[in-house]
Image (cartoon, coloured by chain):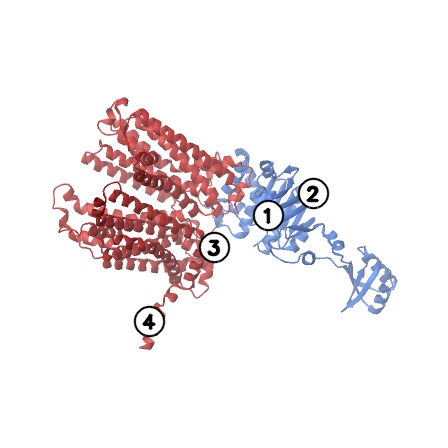
Chain colours: A red, B blue
Amino acid sequence: MNTALTSFWKLFNPARLTGPLFGKELRVSARRKRNYLLRFMYVILLTVFVVIVWLSVVEPQVSTTFQKSRMAVAGKIIISTIVGFQFAATQLIAIVMLSTSISDEIYNRTLGLLMTTPINGFQIVMGKVCSKLLQLILLLAISLPLLAIVRVFGGVAWGYVLSSLCITLTAAIFTGTLSLFFSINNRRAYVVIIKTTVTVGFLFGLLPTIIGGVLMAPMIFGRGPQMGSYPVFWHVLSHFSPFYAISRNTAGLMSPGLPAGVAWFYWPLHCAFMLGLSVLLMALCAGIVRKVALRQVVGQLEHTSKRKRRRRGGKSSLEPAQSEDAVGVVRRVRGSPVLWKDLRAPLIRGVEGRNSLIGLVVTIVALLATYAVWAHEGYLDENFTHISYTVVFVSIAMIFHIVLSASSITVEKESRAWPILLATSMDDWRILSGKAVAVFRRCLPVWLLLAGHVVVFVLVGYIHVIAMVHLSMLVIWLVVFLTCSGLYFSSRFRRTTSAVVTAFGLAFVLWVIVPSVLGLIGAVSRNKYIAQSCVFANPAVQAGVIISGASGRYNARADLGSLRYNWLDGNLDIGSTTAVLAISMLVYVFFGFLFAWRAKCRFRRNIF
Amino acid sequence: MIKTKNLSKDYGSLTAVANLNLTIQQGDIFGFIGPNGAGKTTTMRILVTLLEPTHGTAFIDGLDVRKKGKKVRKLVGYMPDFMGVYDDLKVFEYLEFFAAAFAIERKKRKSIVDGVLELTDLQSKRSATVDSLSRGMQQRLGLARVLIHDPKVLILDEPASGLDPRARIEIRELLRELKRMGKTIMISSHILSELEEICDHVGIIEHGRMVFSGTLEEIRPRLGIESKVRVQVANNQDKAVELLSALPQIRQVQVIDDYISVTFGDDQEGDGIIARTLVNGGLDVTFLQPEQLKLDDAFLQLTKGIVH
């Protein structure tokens, strides 16, 4: 019995499973200031959200009796808000934290060294995942006192708190492991982040929605039974997808007596499924990590995909590539050398030209399919259709601008080519302008989608021509501000991840946090204009307002003077709207150039 | 061609370079030697305008590196101690990119790139991607890049590190060729025997301070090292010792195995006197060689090997 226990302990001893890498990761992360900053920001954000929800539910200006009657509702809403926030935040943090876990080891040439020790691939993977997981658990633990206090208001069962934490944690473990999986073959953190986000979105969002859509098509078109007739699908879906699981769990809290036909949900089953999926992925990662480490030990090219090696002439994964072979066409440098070089890079690093083209074709076909569906439903002349397309295009373009500009210089720093470029006789403004133009040119396909949409529907007569002018103003300031701020962060930081995360952080603070905090102040001081003045500056709001005021079957054909734009404080005419847009354009362009100037000043600092 | 005046660079409380004074004449090959962390790379980075000095000034061909950065960069070719590689650029494209960066006209670029590829023996790798090259080939490519704009001054930080013996010899020959072309070369290396063979002058730096600058011949008196000659005679070693000990210029005569080590009081041409004395004394001289001061020995004596 004793021997059996000892064997069991030996096999499942946590220290053996994670290996010494776990301790090393914890030591290193304890020395990084950014981890403390992350915890601080997490608490601040959580508090802001909770206070906003509290004020909106309890309404401090009304009577105390009313407030007391709302306590139980407020408790439920606050806890569901915290759970929602935690669910989104921990997944995002897990993806970012593990996005460089293996690529850093490869880049620092320590993965091969690890393979010369008794540490195995699984211990490397477990060590990385568990150390980051511990930090995530710490973040979740930070909110526990808040959850406990809010529970005093009543109406929230402990079971909900526990199930939500478990769903959140297992989802974070899976997304973190997926991020680690992508980090094995991708050196750039932002590529890993994008790939992981897209995969998670596809697996747990798009795929179930498509399947559900296909299954429910007869119901949608009114030729089949109601949704309740597909219980099996919803049962499976709520256990397979963490998004559906958390929303189903929260729906159970908000409306305990759910009607018949709504999916049966048992959260431990979902958590077990997610954990099983994560373990499978970890096992896969362990195998691949070992192969990559061996390649490094034998002096193979790091970060080079199997396909790329084959393209270069290496037949097997361990065979060196034939460097002297002529590969492809040698292209001559034309125009600005910086622009020429940057435009050679694929839109997403790690995704080769052919795959980019396939991606573009698939996107356009999918886009045309959505237009066909809207046309079939007769919604193309409705303004909400065009608001959706415009906001989606603007959001995608913003993401591309942030990622490409923030990685523009750090990529060169990481490949150690930046000092060599600075040692040439090109002046700093020329390098900066080359980089900025390259970012814009690389984002152009996304802007062209927006332009195409607007031009086509202006010609068709569903969007007013003035929207082109207003959208141009929006695009100008977005391009200038996002490109220049991204370039500044790229010159400020050495690592791409830091620059990209900070650039996203700036956008998030400017357009989400600041309006939220001002909204809070406005709610307390009963001054709605404080928040509204900030919301005006949000590009998504601007895009929505521009299109909502100038599209639709009535607006598109209306006179300029009769157009009304629905800004948050009421309707504004075209003159006022143009003035609002012009002022925000001037302000953002000014700050954009300020960022560009600071970027130029920082070019030659901290380059080694 | 290169001159520094009280050049200093501080990183917070750490002084990497302290009041460095250095002069390198046009057409010279200057070997820059020092232990790890002595300040060699920092000095080179200041000279190529990648770092700002905290105090002092540096001049390249009379141009202040602080004020005339762009002009200085046109004059200088810098090869750092690491190879900056652009993913997915081919060798020709990589070199043409830098040619364009140095504002060389497009129609001239092809012939210039072909020229440096030939000089560095990289024609066969013209279409290979840069990141697929071996370390030695990348070093050659780095050298080719440095030459692309035909600079007057080459500043090479450890160009031979990580290279195999054949590649090192080839780089050495290439540097000699560049010297013949009139280039001024500042080179740092840890392989002192190689610097010894190609350098006209050396500078030894420690803790950011220049502890010696001059020719190898100038090191001996600086260190207070006496000239020595090793002699071997075919017969009657005792008589040889007796004859040599009688000479007033000779300070010490020692028998080491079948050799006689003769020490002179000052740095003078002692080998002629010794040969004449022994031949006149009827002895057959079978071997006579002045003992060379090795750069390694000088380096060890001049530096304390303390890393800060």
Check whether the beta carbons of the residues at disc 2 and disc 1 lie within 8 A of each other. Answer: no
Q: Image check: A120 left or right of B173?
A: left
Question: Given the image, on which type of amino acid does mark 1 rest?
Answer: Asp
Check whether the beta carbons of the residues at disc 3 and disc 2 lie within 8 A of each other. Answer: no
Do the residues at pointers 2 and 1 share their chain? yes
Residue A431, x across and y down, in percent: 50, 37
Chain assignment, label 1: B
Looking at the rendering, which quadrant does residue A534 occupy?
top left
**Mark 4: secondary structure:** helix
Q: CA distance from mark 4 to mark 1?
A: 58 Å
Q: CA distance from mark 2 to mark 1?
A: 27 Å
Q: Is residue B56 visible?
A: yes
Q: In this figure, which residue is indicated by the disc labeled 2?
A: B25
Residue A539, x across and y down, in percent: 34, 35
Q: CA distance from mark 3 to mark 4?
A: 36 Å
Q: In this figure, which residue is indicated by the disc labeled 4?
A: A8
Q: Is residue A265 above or below residue A582?
A: below
Question: Quick one: label 2, few (<14), some, or many (20+) residues within 10 Å?
Answer: some
Q: CA distance from mark 3 to mark 1?
A: 27 Å
